[in-house]
Image: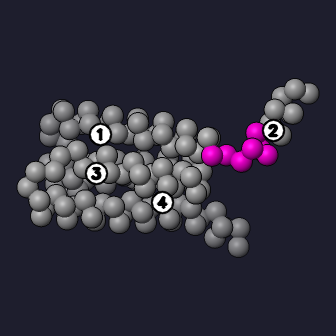
Amino acid sequence: MRIVKEAVPILVAFSIVLIVTAVLWLVKHEAVGPQHLVFFYLLPTALVAVVYGSRPAMLCVIAATGCAAFFLYDPLYSIYVSKPVEMGELICFAGLALIGAKCTADLLRPVVKLSRQNAASED
């Protein structure tokens, strides 16, 4: 039962990434002009950080970066990103999302844990 409890946040994070990727892939192919689609992963990543903490959110960021490179950037269906500007965009997204996930999870951590840590550090 413990394994299932530990696997749920990871499965939810990957499921959210897959759903967002599918929607963004459809938007990319149906619409002509949307750019910078990778940044639409930020909100689901923050949601995972709020609900499950920073580790599943960081896995979500890594999966989102890989999915974006594979499905949203030319050449499609390859991890290779042909334009240096788009590669910079992916790196910027990954850095921003990792920092955001960690900060969001730490800001929303229960106060009880923080007060226990402060008591332990004073001893």
State the residue at coordinates (49%, 55%). 47
Q: Mark 4 points at which residue?
A: 13
Q: Is residue 80 visible?
A: no
Element assignment for label 3: helix
Relative height, residue 3 to residue 74 (above, below): below
- Magenta region, residue range: 108-115
Element assignment for label 2: helix
Q: Name the residue under label 1.
A: 90
Q: Which of 90 and 28 is in front in this view?
A: 28
| Mark carried by residue 71 | none
State the residue at coordinates (28%, 65%). 22
Among the two numbered marks 3 and 2 on one chain, the one whose residue lies closer to the N terminus? 3
Whole-number angstrom distance, CA of label 2 to CA of label 1: 37 Å
Would you say the residues marked 3 and 1 are in contact, meaning their CB atoms lie under 8 Å apart?
Answer: yes
State the residue at coordinates (18%, 32%). 84
Residue 114 located within the stretch drawn in magenta: yes
Q: What residue type is labelled 2?
A: Ser
Q: What residue type is labelled 4?
A: Ala
